Image: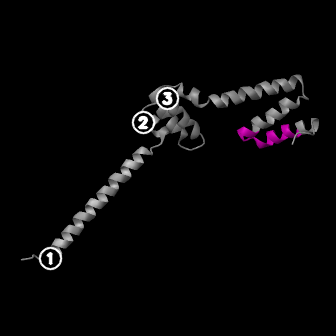
Amino acid sequence: MKTKKTPVKLYSVYVQTSIALVLGLWLLFNLVSSQLMSPLYFNLVSENRLAAASYLKHIQMLPQFLAELNKYRQIYGADIADFVFADKRQETQEINIYEAALCKNPESVTALYNLSLLYGENGNTQKAEEYLNKAKELDPSIK
């Protein structure tokens, strides 16, 4: 004698199958996303000092930068800021060197052009254009 499957039994099988399917998809998603985790995030979690400095360099313009900098100062010490601001200090030193070169030779096209590049990278477009125009006056081949 055959047993008939009642709607309640069918419903129970559907629910169990649906739960197993959703759980399987969730596990698959977690497996794939864990393998695609950002290397920077992994390094931050594993307390990699250079990764923290790189992260801070990338978020300097964001409003939460100071809070993040203070957090990482507590973890790595105050000199983490040295890593973060090293590029800025180097650019400032280069600007000072070219400015000093201009004091000695106001018609140095190289110094004028390099100052225009440095100020342009810093976002000071007015000074960048000023130095570029002076360099172009002295050397019309500059474009």
Residue 18, placed above or below residue 136: below
Protein image colouring: one colour
Badge 1 density bin: few <14, some 14–19, many ≥20, Cα 10 Å: few
On the rendered structure, is 1 left or right of 22? Answer: left
Q: Please state the horizontal and vertical placement of residue 109, each as a whole percent of the image.
A: 88, 31
Residue 1, placed above or below residue 42: below
- Residue 44's tag is none
- Badge nearest the viewer, 1 or 3: 1
At 61% from the left and 30% from the top, the residue drawn is 85
The question of residue 124 being in magenta is answered with yes
On the rendered structure, is 83 left or right of 110? Answer: left
Q: Earlier in the sequence, mark 2 or mark 1?
A: 1
Magenta-drawn segment: 120-133
Badge 2 density bin: few <14, some 14–19, many ≥20, Cα 10 Å: few
Image quadrant occupied by the N terminus: bottom left
The question of residue 136 being in magenta is answered with no
Which residue position holds label 2?
45
Q: Is label 2 in contact with label 1 (beta carbons under 8 Å)?
A: no
Pick the front one: 92 or 46? 46
Image quadrant occupied by the C terminus: top right
Badge 3 density bin: few <14, some 14–19, many ≥20, Cα 10 Å: some
Query: Main SS of the magenta segment?
Result: helix
At 16% from the left and 71% from the top, the residue drawn is 9
Which residue position holds label 3?
49
